Amino acid sequence: MSCGDAAVEALAGLDAWIAGHEDELVDVVSRLVRVPSVGEPFDPKAAQPFGPGCAAVIDATRDLVESYGLAWENHAYYAMEARLPCASIGAADQQDEGVDDAGTVPNLATKAGDIAFFSHLDVVPAGLQGWSIDPFSPYVRDGWLFGRGSSDNKGPFSAVLFALRYLREKNVPLRHDVVLYGGCDEERGMEDVKYLVPRISKPAASLVSDAYFPVCYSEKGIASFDLTRRFDDGSLAAFEGGASHNTVPDRAAFAVRGESGLVRETVEGHAAHAAFPQQGVNAVALAAARAAQVEGASPQVREAMAFIARAFAGYDGSEFGVARHDVELGDTTCVATGARFADGVLSVHVNMRYPASETGQELLARAASAADAAGFSLHVADQSEGYVIDASSPQVEALTDIVNDRLGTQLEPYAMGGATHARWIPGAISFGPGRNDVPGPFPDQPGRGAAHGPDEAVRIQRLKDAVAIYVRAILYLDATL
């Protein structure tokens, strides 16, 4: 059987195989969701650099991967690897074709470089508000699988894994190894992929599953910074909110001394991914607005709280002079994702995302000037420029066609505000099963059911489609690279 004939035969049975393994796919995603793999602060000297939760989810993949006949490797708990070696494909046809001592099918030259998929297994904290279930006790309802990490990114990871499993079971001859990496620091600092990329051979193609279909050709630049201000008059007693550096806070609390004594209040917002702040309601901004209204609070407190409320009631960064609009590459977003008051100093953490056509240093200089005028100091925590790939490249066009053919859509490549592993992998293409063209499980409640939001969910049919799309993408890339 030739490579082309085997591929045609494999595709002919693909939908039936996916339908027959739907329950297993749901079970695998659920098993991973049950592991609360919330990353801890990075410790490069530790045996588990992102903490025990992330280490546990890497360990949880081993039996799965090996049971599918794939090779598994632990990259020092930065990431795991599932590998489908091309030399093992075709071994089942040995009687008909003849296989050399290495297990390679004759007339099928092995090509250098892997077809590599990059996913992540860490998740953001569950948050405090809005969940109707235990975030780490997944369940299925109306065709959706609910649980923290189900869509970001354990569901997509599992879809890629099942694509590799399918090709292994069907013994489809391939010229390239196909490998899936599951990192554990995508949600915090991406130290996983920064560790991994220099230590692996350069892939022939790199695909990142943490995205929307069809293909993302640009991600925004990202700058994280802290606004700090000291309060010496004792009027501000407490201020706290936020659980993740890239999530719109769903709760914040403050305590301010006013004319009637100490005023304490807890304010609830609505969590959402910081890349899509329009889906959430920022509790830090709401709490600051309330604190600014406390009668008898000191002028210093009222002034500072009013500034925070103005700056983050919206999300385009206008108060900092950084609002930018790019029709193709998107608009600037500027979100307060956390606040802490300790030892007389208020610190507000800010996540700013800007179109790749802009330069981060210039925007940060503008933000620092505006912060200074409001009595705050700006301290840059992290920054990475955006990236753009050629949206008209043959690979982007072919992958887009594969998606549209499967889904019956006319989707176009797009730019987004989310940050993925792709920005740290040379030549990577973001190619994930998310959808922003169809409603989520709660169409009347923006943010609920979405990544980083309460009741995060993934549609099961979407994962099944993703398995089929990934199989076709692998076959296309294997034949053309």
Image: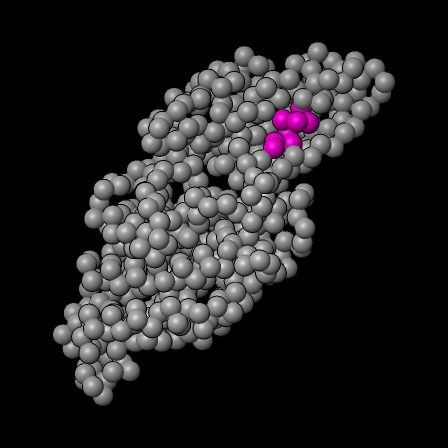
Of residue 110 and residue 372, the one placed in the foreground of this image is 110
Specify whether 99 is left or right of 455.
left
The colour mode here is one colour
Camera-nearest residue between 324 and 123: 324
Query: How many numbered marks are there?
Result: 0
Tell me what residue is drawn at x 39 percent, y 35 percent: 220
Q: Is residue 285 magenta?
A: yes
Q: Where in the figure is residue 110, as x and y percent of width and height?
A: 19, 68
**Residue 187 visible:** yes
Residue 339 visible to an observer of this rendering: no
Indicate the quadrant where residue 467 lies.
bottom left
| Farthest bottom residue in view | 95
Q: Position of residue 70 (x, y in %)?
A: 38, 72
Q: Is residue 223 left or right of residue 239?
A: left
- At 55% from the left and 57% from the top, the residue drawn is 144
| The quadrant where residue 90 appears | bottom left
Towards the viewer: 458 or 226: 458
Residue 162 lies in magenta, yes or no? no
In this picture, which residue range is highlighted in magenta?
281-288
Residue at figure coordinates x 76%, y 29% from the top left: 265
Residue 418 location in percent, x, y? Answer: 44, 40
Q: Residue at x 45, y 75 (%)?
A: 67
Residue 417, x across and y down, in percent:
43, 36
> Extreme front residue here?
408
